[in-house]
Amino acid sequence: MQSQNISDIIEKYLKSILADSEHVEIRRSEIADLFNVVPSQINYVIKTRFTIQNGYLVESKRGGGGYIRIEKVNLVDDADVLDALIQVIGDSITQRDAYAVVQSLYEDDVLNRREAQLILVAIDHDTLGLTDRDLENSLRARIIIGILNHLRYES
Amino acid sequence: MQSQNISDIIEKYLKSILADSEHVEIRRSEIADLFNVVPSQINYVIKTRFTIQNGYLVESKRGGGGYIRIEKVNLVDDADVLDALIQVIGDSITQRDAYAVVQSLYEDDVLNRREAQLILVAIDHDTLGLTDRDLENSLRARIIIGILNHLRYES
DNA sequence: TTATCTTTGACTAATATTGACTTTTATTAT
DNA sequence: ATAATAAAAGTCAATATTAGTCAAAGATAA
């Protein structure tokens, strides 16, 4: 509905390509030119919107013929990916990243809409109502990991 | 009805937009300018007049292209049952009592089996991993209440 | 008068944008 | 083959652009 900032627009552009193909491979400077931004903004978009929490793997190469390649992966049905995700979460996760995890579980059809929303409520900042941000993030990590392991066991 | 303070006027303005469309999306500073108030008054209006009890969901984003989005949702009929449960839970609940609450929601077909299990994982003693029992119980209360509040409306 | 509601603003937090500098890899010249 | 150069992408910190919080002061209602 809203795509006011250019990062959201670039995100949508890349995801529209990913909707059709398994992966997308870009030249950073080309995308930057296309949207009239500095090249490092492409890194920003990737770093904030195409993380493993979002269900994406990114690889790149520098130098002549360099590229950035983004691949969509499923988080739960590949045990290695799930382990990697759990490791990245570690003992702390922000609401934003946790939201991304739940969102991608929904996109992977591991959770339906209602289940995803129940989980989002459980890990919400306002729900937890803590003032200590570190405690909030570590609690959120335990809840998310608990749920991931439950889903793993289930499937 | 007669004495219209500025908060009431802003409330009416937003609701007049919501009368036509499912949601309204604003830039906080723009609305503040429009009514000649400080930006934080918009937060006050939202916090006091667009609560979930009244059937409104609010989400926002900061930074460039930031926004506040208000959505009207349909409240379920038996909200008073939820209110009663919330009353009973208060600000603290043991794992055993929480299990009973989730169990009864399952038996009343408010939750299905899978949803109930996800919630039980989230409020489990081992999942939360806290040493402070009071904190654990109050956190569990907040999570359950958050979920009950979520069940007030259909999305 | 007292309790509640409203208004204000200083401070905080989150997110986005930009550009200078670094690192890696490929290609070209010697 | 090696060295120099070019062509990519990566990092990081400064700045900009929003919204959020909180408490004090003011206004209104009971």
Image: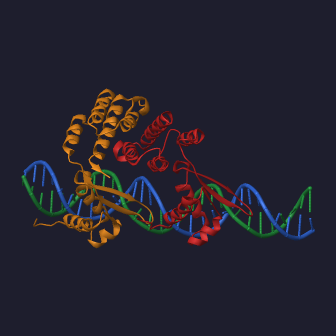
Chain colours: A red, B orange, C blue, D green
| Residue B105 drawn at (x, y percent) | 28, 36
Q: Furthest residue to the top? A: B96
Horizontal side, residue A153 vs residue B41: left or right: right
Horizontal side, residue A59 vs residue B3: left or right: right
Nearer to me, B76 or B30: B76
Q: Residue at x 39, y 31 (%)?
A: B124
- Residue A79 versus residue B2 in the image, above or below: above
| Residue B73 drawn at (x, y percent) | 28, 55
The answer to which image quadrant residue A128 occupies is top left
Q: Residue at x 20, y 39 (%)?
A: B84
Residue B11 seen: yes
| Residue A117 drawn at (x, y percent) | 38, 47
Nearer to me, B127 or B55: B55
> Dividing the image into 4 quarters, which one contains the N terminus of chain B?
bottom left
| Residue C25 drawn at (x, y percent) | 76, 57
- Residue C23 versus residue A65 in the image, above or below: above
The answer to which image quadrant residue A25 occupies is bottom right
Nearer to me, C18 or A79: A79
- Residue D15 versus residue A80 in the image, above or below: below
Nearer to me, B6 or A69: A69
Horizontal side, residue B121 vs residue A19: left or right: left
Residue A44 seen: no
